[in-house]
Amino acid sequence: MASDIHVRDASSTDLGILISLMKEFYAEANYELDIQSALQSFMSLFRDPNYGRVWIVSIGETPIGHAVLAVRFTMEHGGVSGYVDDLFVVKEFRRHGAAHAMLIELEKECRKRNCRALIVEVGRDNTAGLKTYEKLGMRLIDDGRVLYRKPL
């Protein structure tokens, strides 16, 4: 099945597919998707690729997942860093190489942009995700930091 996997750039014509995938992604985590916010976010990425990039992964003609790369300058890395902002594969298509294929594309894009690091946020109980990231040479950062957020 891995030979049928195809990763391509997403565009504004894919908004319906992306929102559908995000709904499923968010439902798995018991989050409510703000559709308007998601649409605006995708459109921001499509209008200004300096913010990042979006991919869709398919098996044959069937979209089965998506990935979003966000980029920003960080003092910690002394340059631009890439962040896997979203990475999702529909449950029944997992463990067939789709996430790996998307991560390869994200890393290629980061190298083109001269990113100093590629970072992903993942749940500690997501053992399949952890293994996938480790296979790609990513290492756990467990340095005692705590993440705070304030919506603006």
Image (spheres, rainbow, N blue to C red):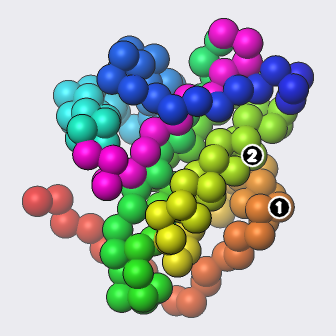
Q: Which residues are magenta?
A: 48-61
Residue 4 or residue 150, whichever sits in front: 4
Give amino acid for label 2.
Answer: His
Residue in front for this viewpoint, 140 or 31? 140
Residue drawn where x is 53% and y is 41% of the image: 67
Residue 34 quadrant? top left
Query: In the displayed structure, would residue 61 be above or below residue 123?
Result: above
**The C terminus lies in which quarter of the figure?**
bottom left
- In this rendering, position of residue 114 left or right of residue 52: right
Find residue 100 and name its label: 2
Say whether disc 1 or disc 2 marks the residue closer to the N-terminus: 2
Residue 21's tag is none
Quarter of the figure that contains the N terminus: top right
Residue 139: % across, % down: 71, 75
Decide if residue 80 is in sight here: yes
- The answer to whether residue 30 is left or right of residue 136 is left
Q: Establish if 144 lies above or below 85.
A: below
Secondary structure state at the residue bearing disc 2? helix
Residue 44 in the image: state x and y as whole percent: 23, 41
Q: Residue furthest front?
A: 112
Q: Amino acid at mark 1?
A: Lys
Q: Residue at x 46, y 39 (%)?
A: 54
* Relative height, residue 52 to residue 143 (above, below): above
Mark 1: give few (<14), some (14-19) or many (20+) Cα within 10 Å: few
Q: Residue at x 33, y 47 (%)?
A: 49
Residue 55 vs residue 99, the one in the foreground: 55
Picture disc at residue 135 = 1
Q: Position of residue 58 (x, y in %)?
A: 66, 21
In the rendered image, residue 35 lying in the magenta stretch gets the answer no
Q: Are marks 1 and 2 in contact (CB under 8 Å)?
A: yes
Q: Residue at x 71, y 70 (%)?
A: 138
Q: Residue 31's quadrant in the figure?
A: top left
